[in-house]
Image: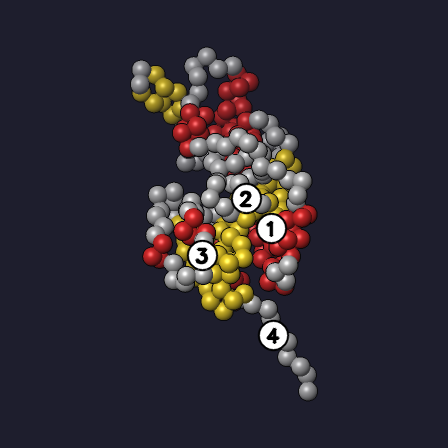
Amino acid sequence: MQKIISSPVFNSVLYFGRKNCIYSNKIKTFLKRHSRKFQYIESKNISTKLFSTEIKLDQYDYIFCFRSFFVFKKNILNRCKKAAINFHPGTPEYREIGCINYALYNEAKYYGSTAYIMDEKIDNGKILNVKRFKIGKKENIESCSIKTNRLMFKQATHIIKLLLKNEKNLQKLINSANKEKWSKKIKVRTKLDEFYRVSTNISKRNFLKKLRATKTQNFKPYILLHSKKFELKD
């Protein structure tokens, strides 16, 4: 008689994803299938609120966060027994918000995603893994975002499968990434808003750099004239 080998499962998982994100949904399907107890909470935009009363269990083995808009406080992170892992759309050189914008403006050669264990500070915990791709000369925000999300999805599924196979792989990931360090610089939303502002005496070269690093379908650089904001039009 052939022996049936059951697939490994997590005991309990709390997963945060993004609404209308194909990769968030793929990870949700996988985690739900491989968890005895599973809860999914999604966010639509930066204004989405998270209330601790929404979380069903007092303790989870793992918390996973993929493209979520939530900022996690101590009362949420304390509900995790083993590790609360975030997949950050940026390399350790770029923390919090506007990562792609600054990387393109700085003419960085590489960009990518970082998996790390969350603590109370933003983009600060122990790094588990960094994946990078080369930025082409014709890359813009949208093309870099597509590549980053695709790479981050592969990174997330790889790490989740490693932990599913053996929880000791968590320490192995920490050890293998010990040379990766977070930048001391951190950008907040007000700084990004200022970054989108274009000075009226900007040089042509810096203007083209700024254009590359700010212009998308939904967001545009702007000038401020007599307290009035004028956005760039195509």
Identify the element where label 4 is drawn: loop
Q: Which of the two residues, 81 or 3, is positioned nearer the viewer here?
A: 81
The answer to which image quadrant residue 103 occupies is top right
- Camera-near label (2 vs 1) is 2
Residue farthest to the left, as pictured: 227
Label placed on residue 79: 3
Q: What residue type is labelled 3?
A: Arg
* Position of the C terminus by quadrant: top left
- Residues at discs 2 and 4 in contact (Cβ within 8 Å): no
Q: What residue type is labelled 4?
A: Ser
- Residues at discs 2 and 1 in contact (Cβ within 8 Å): no
Q: Residue at x 54, y 57 (%)?
A: 82
Q: Badge 3, how many Cα within 10 Å: few under 14, some, many 20+?
A: some
| Mark earlier in primary sequence (2, 4) | 4
Q: Name the residue under label 1.
A: 155
Q: What residue type is labelled 2?
A: Gly
Q: Mark 2 points at which residue?
A: 125
- Residues at discs 1 and 4 in contact (Cβ within 8 Å): no
Residue 15, percent across and down?
Answer: 47, 56
Q: Residue at x 38, y 25 (%)?
A: 231
Identify the element where label 1 is drawn: helix
Q: Badge 1, how many Cα within 10 Å: few under 14, some, many 20+?
A: some
